[in-house]
Amino acid sequence: MPSTLPVAPWRVFTVEVRALRRLSPSFLRVTFTGPDLDRFADNGYDQRIKLALPLPGTVGELPDGADWYRRWRELPVDRRCPIRTYTVRAVRRQVPEVDVDLVLHGDGGPATRWARRARVGDQLAVVGPDAGYDGPHGGLEFRPPRGATLLLAGDETAAPAICGILERLPAEARGHALIEVPDPADALPLAGPPGVAVTWLARAGQGHGSRLVPAVTALAAELLPVPAPAGAAPGPLTDVDVDREILWEVPAPAGPAPLYAWLAGEAGVIRGLRRHLVTERGVDRGAVAFMGYWRLGRAES
Ligand SMILES: Cc1cc2nc3c(=O)[nH]c(=O)nc-3n(C[C@H](O)[C@H](O)[C@H](O)COP(=O)(O)OP(=O)(O)OC[C@H]3O[C@@H](n4cnc5c(N)ncnc54)[C@H](O)[C@@H]3O)c2cc1C
C-alpha cells in the first residue's frame, strides 16, 4: 500500500559508488547510484548535501526517516558516522546517478580520507533533496536579483558550486567567476554563458587566498570604482570570530541591485573579502552571500 506519510524536503539516500574519476590533481569525481536516486531532486546551482562517511570497518550509514538528524545525534559517538557537507555536481535521475566532486586535501578528515581510498561498490548515506516534495527544498544559497552583474568567487571547495551555477545561468547573464585552486591543472572545463568571464587562479604552493584576495579586490575596484565614503557601510559589520563561529551570511532575495556577489571557501579568506567588499567598497550586504564554511586547521563539526 502506498505510504500516506507527508514527504519531507530532505531524505536519506543509501548509495554506492558506481564510478570514480580523477578529474585533476585535486578533484575526484564520485558517481553514486542507488535504488532511490530516481527521487533525488535535480535543483542545480549550489545545492548542498550531506555525506555520511564510514567509521573504520563499517559502511557510511544514517538512521532513516525525517528525524534522522535527532536519531543520529543520539547515537553513541563510536557509532555516529561523521557527516560532511558537499555540493551536488550533477544529477541523472533516469539512470539514476548523482555526481559529487571532492577535493583531495590531505588525509586528516573523514571525507578526504574516504575519498582517497574509495572503491567502486563502497556504500554511503547521502542526505539530499527529495523530488517527491512539492516545494523548495532549501540548501540553495545562490539567489541573485534579476539582471545584476554577478561576482562569483571561491576556492576549490566552491568550484563544484560555481560550475553548477554557471551551467544553469540564463544565456544573457553577465559577470565574473574567480576560482582559486591548488594547481594549474585543476582548472576544469565548464560551460557557462558567454557574458560571464571565468578565471582560474592557481595557488601553486602559496597560502589560501593568496590569489583570490588580490583578484577579487582588483575586480571590485573595476566594477565599483568609487569606494564607499568612511562610515557609509549599511549597518555595523561585526567581525565574525571564524575560529569559533561559522561565517554564513546569505541574504533573502531582495529588490534590484547592480551587483550580486556569491563568495565561498576558507573562513579566514572569506571574512577578509567580506570586510573589503562591504566596508571599503560599500557593497550592499543584502546583495552578497558570504559562506566561510571550512576553516584551516579545524574539522567541520
Ligand atoms: C555548503 C558547502 C558545500 C561544500 N561543497 C564542497 C564540494 O563540493 N567539494 C568539496 O571538496 N568540499 C566542499 N565543501 C567543503 C567540505 O565540506 C570541507 O572541506 C570539509 O571540511 C571536508 O571534510 P574532511 O572530512 O575532508 O575534513 P575535516 O575533518 O572537516 O577537516 C580536517 C582538516 O582538514 C582541513 N581541511 C578541510 N577542508 C580542506 C580543504 N579543502 N583544503 C585544505 N584543508 C582542508 C581542516 O582545516 C582540518 O584541519 C563544502 C562545504 C559546505 C559547507
Image (tube, grey):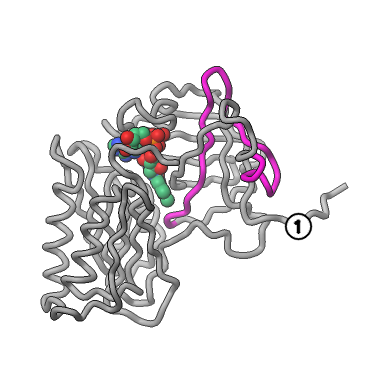
Question: Which of 260/84 is in front?
Answer: 84
Q: Which residue is mark 1?
A: 6
Q: Is residue 236 left or right of residue 93?
A: left
Residue 13 location, x and y as percent?
62, 40
In the image, what residue occupies the spot 46% across and 47% down?
88
Q: Secondary structure at mark 1?
A: loop
Q: Quadrant of the C terminus?
A: top left
Q: Give the amino acid at mark 1.
A: Pro
Whether residue 102 is visible here, answered yes or no, is no
Residue farthest to the right, as pictured: 1
Give the image quadrant in which the ligand numbered 1 is located. Answer: top left
Quadrant in the rendering for residue 74: top right
In the image, what residue occupies the spot 52% across and 20% down?
56
Residue 64 location, x and y as percent?
69, 40
Residue 2 location, x and y as percent?
84, 49
Residue farthest to the top, as pictured: 57
Q: Which residues are magenta?
A: 45-71
In the image, what residue occupies the spot 55% across and 23% down?
121
Whether residue 111 is visible here, answered yes or no, is yes
Disc 1 crowd rating (10 Å Cα; few below 14, some 14-19, many 20+) is few
Question: Which of 151/175 is in front?
Answer: 151
Q: Is residue 52 magenta?
A: yes
In the image, what residue occupies the spot 16% across and 55% down?
213
